[in-house]
Image: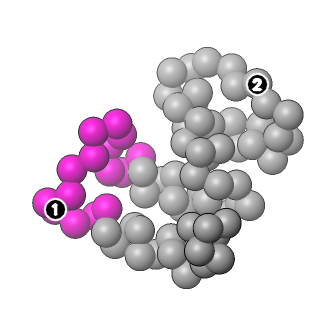
């Protein structure tokens, strides 16, 4: 959303958290509480969704994440 629409995270993350917290919204890949944690981590860091999701997934699967992104490696 930042690159394509030019919207800052502080503007769209609260809306995404509200949207995905709705009872009738189903998520197949990840549980809602984990998704909310990913959004919160995105708010705290300068990382995008994909980076934070991969960090979360690596920690859930207890595997080491390799990356050239030093900020990403700090949260893993």
Q: How many marks?
A: 2
| Disc on the earlier residue, 2 or 1 | 1
In percent of width and height, residue 34 lies at 41, 46
How far is disc 2 from disc 1 in space, using C-alphas?
36 Å
Residue 61 lies in magenta, yes or no? no
Q: Which residues are magenta?
A: 20-34
Secondary structure under the numbered disc 1 in the rendered image: loop
Q: Residue at x 14, y 60 (%)?
A: 24
Residues marked 2 and 1 touching at CB (< 8 Å): no
x and y percentages locating residue 28 in the rendered image: 27, 39
Q: Quadrant of the C terminus?
A: top right
Residue at the extreme left: 24
Name the element at disc 2. Answer: loop
Label ID, residue 23: 1
Which residue is at the front of the view, 32 or 51? 51
The residue tagged 2 is 66
Left or right? Give the position of 22 relative to 37. left
Label 1 crowd bin: few (<14), some (14–19), many (20+), radius 10 Å:
few
Q: Main secondary structure of the magenta part?
A: loop
Query: Image quadrant for the N terminus?
Result: bottom right
Residue found at x 21% / y 58% = 25
Compared to residue 7, the image places residue 66 above or below, namely above
Residue at position x 58%, y 27% from top?
58
Q: Residue at x 77, y 37 (%)?
A: 73
Q: Position of residue 62 (x, y in %)?
A: 56, 20
Quarter of the image where one finds residue 23 = bottom left
Residue 9 shows in the view = no
Q: Residue 40 falls in which quadrant of the image?
A: bottom right
Q: Is residue 64 above or below residue 75?
A: above
Q: Position of residue 14 (x, y in %)?
A: 46, 75
């Amino acid at each position: 959303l930042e690159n394509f629409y030019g919207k800052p995270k502080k503007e769209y993350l609260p809306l995404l958290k509200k949207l995905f917290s709705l009872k009738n919204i189903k998520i197949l890949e990840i549980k809602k509480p984990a998704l909310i944690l990913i959004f919160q981590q995105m708010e705290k860091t300068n990382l995008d969704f994909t980076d934070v999701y991969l960090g979360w997934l690596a920690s859930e699967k207890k595997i080491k994440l390799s990356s050239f992104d030093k900020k990403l490696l700090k949260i893993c």
